[in-house]
């Protein structure tokens, strides 16, 4: 009885924290020597049993960390309820007013319980473009497009019901936009994203939220400069 109750509570918690899809970053990597702490709060409507049953968006809380690696490249990780996403961002072009970057990512959402478990693995490939707004260039507009391959998995191990495993693959596609405002080391942003499941017909998934980032450290200067 206790095990089943615990499983139910954990599942309810997990359904409020399904995989995140928000555009939390622009196209400009941190410089080597810089790192950033970030927190985000959003509402999202995705394909999970609780959202479908209640027909309402669910809250999502995320914490993130980024660090500059080399010129034009940084990496980051985001954690949320029972899940995490890691990515590598590379700015590969400047097209007119836009900086353009790709940000491949690998995400894991999993919830094992005493009797069963489920989750998914996401492989994302977004392309992000960012341009400054206004004469003082303290704000920027970010546009993104992405494809996500998602592998769902679930397993069952119960003395009464038996055991087994199942899974399915989905291909998601969509895009988003965000506005970022810069205040010295502080970054404030708002974003909205939509995704569609190309593997089967269904409702549009969407995410909207706001985030706060703090840039620490100083850009590293080579001795030869």
Image (cartoon, rainbow, N blue to C red):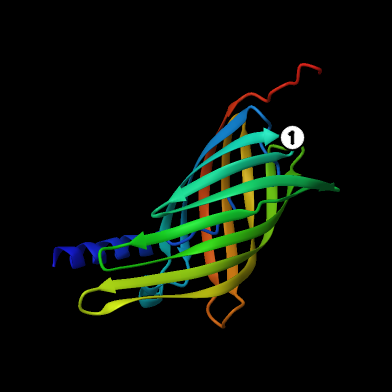
Q: In the displayed image of the protein, which residue is found farthest to the left?
A: 1
Residue drawn 29% across the image and 61% down it = 10
Residue displayed at 63% across by 52% down: 178
Q: Quadrant of residue 194?
A: bottom right
Q: As displayed, is residue 163 above or below residue 137?
A: below
> Which residue is nearer to you in this view: 23 or 18?
18
Look at the image and tell me whether residue 98 can be seen.
no
* Residue 181 falls left or right of residue 225: left
SS under mark 1: loop
- Of 166 and 19, nearer the camera is 166
| Rendered image quadrant of residue 55 | bottom left
Q: Position of residue 134 (x, y in %)?
A: 74, 42
- Toward the viewer: 29 or 1? 1
Q: Quadrant of the N terminus?
A: bottom left
Image coordinates for residue 219, horizontal then vertical, percent: 68, 25
> From the viewer's perspective, is 33 left or right of 137?
left
Q: Residue at x 39, y 55 (%)?
A: 82
At horizontal 54% and vertical 59% (from top left) the residue drawn is 21
Q: Is residue 108 visible?
A: yes
Q: Is 108 in front, or is 188?
A: 108
Classify 10 Å Cα crowding around label 1: few (below 14), some (14-19), many (20 and above).
Answer: few
Residue situated furthest right in the rendering: 96
Instruction: Locate the C terminus and report the quarter of the image it occupies.
Output: top right
Residue 25 lies, in percent from the top left, at 62, 47
In the picture, measured across the screen, residue 163 lies left or right of residue 4, that is right
Mark 1, residue position: 71
């Amino acid at each position: 009885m206790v095990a089943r109750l615990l499983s139910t509570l954990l599942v309810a918690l997990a359904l409020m924290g399904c995989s995140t899809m928000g555009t939390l970053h622009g196209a400009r990597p941190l410089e080597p020597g810089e790192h950033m702490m970030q927190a985000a709060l959003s509402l999202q409507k995705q394909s999970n049993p609780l959202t479908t049953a209640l027909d309402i968006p669910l809250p999502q809380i995320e914490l993130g960390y980024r660090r500059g690696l080399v010129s034009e490249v940084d990496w980051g990780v985001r954690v949320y309820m029972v899940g995490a996403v890691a990515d590598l961002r590379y700015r590969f072009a400047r097209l007119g007013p836009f900086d353009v970057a790709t940000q491949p990512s690998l995400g894991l959402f999993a919830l094992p319980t005493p009797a069963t478990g489920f989750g998914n693995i996401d492989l994302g490939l977004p392309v992000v473009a960012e341009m400054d707004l206004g004469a003082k260039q303290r704000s920027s507009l970010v546009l993104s497009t992405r494809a996500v391959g998602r592998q769902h998995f679930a397993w069952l191990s119960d003395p009464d019901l038996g055991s087994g495993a199942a899974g399915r693959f989905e291909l998601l596609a969509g895009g988003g936009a965000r506005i970022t405002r810069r205040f010295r080391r502080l970054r404030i942003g708002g974003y909205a994203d939509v995704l569609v499941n190309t593997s089967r017909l269904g409702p549009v998934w969407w995410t909207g939220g706001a985030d706060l980032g703090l840039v620490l450290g100083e850009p590293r200067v080579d001795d030869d400069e």
